[in-house]
Amino acid sequence: MFSIKNHKVDINPWESAKKKLEIAAKEIDMDPNTLSYLNKTERSLVVSIPVIMDDGRLVNFEGFRCHHSTIRGPAKGGIRYSSDVTLDEIKALAFLMTMKNALLNLPLGGSKGGVRVDPHKVSKKELERITRRYTAEIINIIGPDIDIPAPDMGTDEQIMAWIFDTYSMQKGRPVPGVVTGKPTEIGGSVGRTGAVGTGMSYIVYEFCKRKDLDLKSMNIAIQGFGKVGKEIGKKLYDYGCNIIGVSDSKGGIYNPNGLEINDLIRFKNHENSVRDFDSNGGMKLNNEELIALECDMLCPCATENQLYSGNAESVNCRIILEGANSPTTSKADEIFESKDIIVIPDILANSGGVIISYFEYIQDIQSYFWDLDRINREMQHVLLDTFDVVYRVSKERNVSLRTAAYMIAGQRLAKAHELRGLFP
Ligand code: GLU
């Protein structure tokens, strides 16, 4: 028995995130004052969320909302519900949103929020009360021109709908632009569900085209089979890839002849673990074994710090496509570089979600909604332009795709910092 655990005991995600910027900052000769500015979160709010549970007990949940930077626009980033979320993890994820939004050249800063709760262990009514009270506690630091939350691990459309409603009730008018990832019936955008997987599929397609790699002959392993893992699994399967291994928090399966991904998704959607799926003569395996599978591409789609100094040497693929945020520590990055494993970094690979969130936000503000064709076309445009510049910088400067992505984002942030200057 194993679990996809967060190796956060020995790795501080916030320190690891800053290390990645430090490497890029050297490459672009970033002013040390700017680096020092970016090494801090603008504001972090820690709140207590008292909630009466269904059995009458009062439980205090802990919640966070961090704005890492608003230098390029209002802060933007998801809200995560998880039983082991910490302030440093939220800070690191907020920082990643700053880098992601700057890389995509969206007029947005970076933020993240979280509540320490396992959403599967509370009732729907309890979840609603937690969400509404959390929203009330952070109400002064969110809003369409301040900070716009969205879904992340453990949160969904329904939770976004409750945030929208709670915020609007307090303001006395509907404010759909306060949150993205809402249901389409109340100001959500078409294409937001599945956006991360769609974006990843555009990126991987383009990457393979440039590298002259045939997607149809690729063997793939996917770690984590939640929203993102399922989405990218389906897209890669439709491209003709051979998905040989998949895992979730309870265990994994392996079949070198390939897994029937649509059946596996149906099976998983019925609250099953992938390890109990009939893999047609395949075998069960654990998380570390899945990570070490010999394959062309490994897709870490679970959570942070899954690929770290303790297991990076065992990774046996040519390409890592990061579906999760920050699945690779800075130490593991060094090991992958030395092994010539190419990492397609999170802030590029999984950025389809925030791109469509941005589209949702502007549609809400304009009260004018686009169709799916336009959404996908415009997303593809943003993603492929971004991919192109990251790929070119990486070639020209002989740096990893991650360092190239951070260099581009870092330059844009430094320019904004220079133009705005420091108050007072
Ligand atoms: N939580 C998602 C991410 O990590 C989306 C954020 C957003 O849509 O604002 O990119």
Image (cartoon, grey):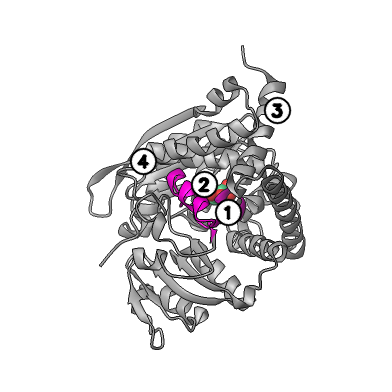
State how far apart marks 1 and 4 are (Cα).
Answer: 23 Å
Q: Earlier in the sequence, mark 1 or mark 4?
A: 4
Are dots 3 and 2 in contact, CB under 8 Å?
no
Classify mark 2 as within 8 Å of ligand 1 or not, answering yes or no. yes
Crowding at dot 1, Cα within 10 Å, few <14 / some 14-19 / many 20+, comes out as many
Q: Which mark is residue 78?
A: 2
Which residue is labeled 3 in the image?
415
Q: Quadrant of the N terminus?
A: bottom left
When the figure is inspected, residue 379 is found, relative to residue 19, above or below; the finding is below
Front residue of 399 and 269: 399
Which residue is labeled 4 in the image?
86
Query: From the viewer's perspective, is 103 left or right of 220?
Result: right
Local SS, label 3? helix
Q: Residue 322's spot in the image, x, y percent?
A: 53, 56
Classify mark 1 as within 8 Å of ligand 1 or not, answering yes or no. yes
**Tag in front: 2 or 1:** 2
Task: Tell me the residue at 67%/65% (across/down).
Answer: 208
Which residue is labeled 1 in the image?
181
**Tag in front: 4 or 3:** 3
